[in-house]
Amino acid sequence: MTIQNAMVLAAGLGTRLRPITDRLPKPLVPVGGRPMIDYVLDSLAEAGVTKVAINIHHHADMMLSHLAKRMDMEILISDERDRLMNNGGGLVKGLKLLPDGPVLVMNADLFWVGEPENQLSNLRELIQFFDPDRMDMAMLCVTLEQAIGHDGKKDFNLDAEARLTRYSEGDPTPVVYAGAFVVDTAFFADAPDEPFNLNIYFDKAIRNGRLFGTMLSGHWITVGSPDGLEAAEGFLGTRQLIASGAG
């Protein structure tokens, strides 16, 4: 399967990263010397995506200026300056800019490093894993040991058949949602045109027995707070030292 369309969720206020986000939208906060959203768009481009809808709200003019520099894909803007739609409502609004069918959905404030060079990238693996005949959603997941900057919360349990359910204390295979999934736009046919949380549709897929997960290769970096940003910078700095042979 190939997927050429994607939605990037980028409209959040980034309140936990204040005061940095008082002057920058969270997706443009630099980590390892690059705005976070550039890692995301690079991953999408490598996976074969050619058209991306991106929602904007906070410091929208800065986002528009930055995204206008991107020449390797068509970028469509889902404008939420008048009204924030939460992640679910924002996704549904943005999907209206894209053709119907399978779509990659990603958060703008996380990325991964250290993918093995001798295998498919994480997004290509996710695309190949998605089977619409038995899945409503295919979700990229990560273990806590691979997560940098994460607060330690466990999201799901992954069973032997790669099916996901909500994590309960004592579950044997806890995983964290890594901020990327594949879904067919038809799954949101009954979604409201109002703000709502995407967890509603994660739970719908779980009730259907059709939420599946595949594991990320490498290390997943998320920045939800100043401590998370410090952890991410420290991790990337250490990797750079190792790669250069220093330290």
Image (cartoon, rainbow, N blue to C red):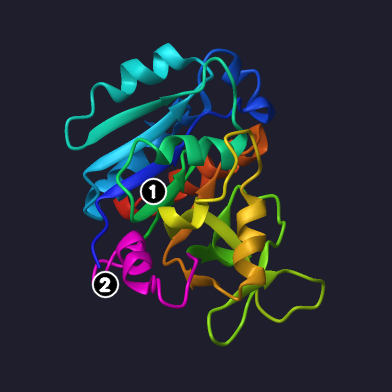
Residue 99 can be seen, yes or no:
yes
Residue 23 lies in quadrant: top right
Residue 247 can be seen, yes or no:
no
Q: In what element is the residue under mark 1?
A: helix
Nearer the observer, 40 or 239:
40
Q: In the displayed structure, would residue 243 be above or below residue 57?
A: below
Specify the amino acid type for callout 1. Answer: Leu
Q: Which residue lies most toward the right here?
A: 169
Q: What is the x, y in percent for residue 170?
A: 80, 78
Nearer the observer, 218 or 58:
58
98 to the left or right of 187 = left
Q: What is the x, y in percent for residue 28?
A: 44, 26
Are the residues flagged by discs 1 and 2 in contact, CB closer than 8 Å?
no
Which residue sits at x=33%, y=50%? 100
Q: In the displayed structure, would residue 95 be above or below residue 194?
A: below
Q: Identify the disc placed on residue 119.
A: 2
Residue 63 lies in quadrant: top left
Q: Is residue 118 magenta?
A: yes
Which residue sits at x=66%, y=38%? 227
Q: Quadrant of the N terminus?
A: bottom left
122 to the left or right of 204 = left
Specify the amino acid type for callout 2. Answer: Gln
Nearer the observer, 194 or 220:
194
Crowding at label 2, few (<14), some or many (≥20) Cα neighbours within 10 Å? few
Q: Which residues are magenta?
A: 115-137
Q: How many marks?
A: 2
Nearer the observer, 154 or 228:
154
Q: What is the x, y in percent for residue 195?
A: 63, 34
Q: Which residue lies most toward the bottom here?
A: 160
* Sooner in the amino-acid sequence: mark 1 or mark 2: 2
Residue occupied by mark 1:
241
